[in-house]
Amino acid sequence: DDRIQLWENNMSLQEQLEETVHGFVIECLGSRIGRSPHTFESRPIWSAMRETGSELWLDTGSIPETSDLWVQEFSALTTNNTLLNHEIQNGQYDDLIPRAAQLLEEFRLSQQEQLLEIAFILNAVHGLKLVHEFDAFVSVEEHTDLANDVSRAVATGMRYHAICPERFIVKIPLTPAGLLAT
């Protein structure tokens, strides 16, 4: 009976964590959530490609690089932890990381759990920025630490989906557990 109560308390703590992180991610974008304020030109070559039934993705999460390349015919962007790290190294998230760490303090996570939550927050916030800036679908990638954990991979994928169900596409590591999670 004590074990069941402990499990229920842990679940409610996990749910509180997820709800808190979800709210934090949405708050980070504030009024910028919604359709892009930008209009993009059309290019005949890309129109011809779209007419073949192809979806046109840019394999970048860099907002400046995408701004130089994006046209109406593109539909999606992809980002991953390596590409996101480039944005972090450029200082784009210098203020967000300490705020996220402070937010997570009350949950008394292990260092590894805190790292995974901050990675989740960064991917979600950056993905939402890309959705907003380019009116695009965005693939967000789960952390490789989840590559062999089916239940955590599923739970994390559902958390990404809950943040932006109409535009996020969740990438899961290609492992046996990842395939099962998918």
Image: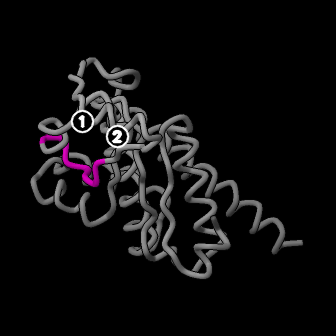
Asked if the residue at tag 1 contacts the one at tag 2, i.e. Cβ–Cβ closer than 8 Å, the answer is: yes
For the residue pair 74 and 152, the one nearer the viewer reads as 74
Locate residue 60, reporting x and y percent. Answer: 25, 52
**Horizontal side of residue 48 vs 52, given as left or right:** left
Mark 1 lies on a secondary structure that is helix
Residue plotted at (39% across, 36% down): 50
Residue at mark 2: 49
10 Å crowding of disc 1: few (<14), some (14-19), many (20+): few
Residue plotted at (67% across, 73% down): 180
Q: Quadrant of residue 88?
A: bottom left
Q: Alpha-carbon distance for marks 2 and 1?
A: 6 Å
Indicate the amino acid at tag 1. Answer: Ile
For the residue pair 93 and 106, the one nearer the viewer reads as 93
Residue plotted at (32% across, 55% down): 79
Q: How is the image coloured?
A: one colour
Magenta part of the chain = 58-64
Q: Is residue 80 magenta?
A: no
Locate residue 67, reporting x and y percent. Answer: 16, 35
**Horizontal side of residue 169 vs 4, given as left or right:** left
Mark 2 lies on a secondary structure that is helix
Eyeballing the image, is 149 above or below 136? below
**Horizontal side of residue 55 vs 175, given as left or right:** left
Indicate the amino acid at tag 2. Answer: Met
**Horizontal side of residue 154 vs 64, given as left or right:** right
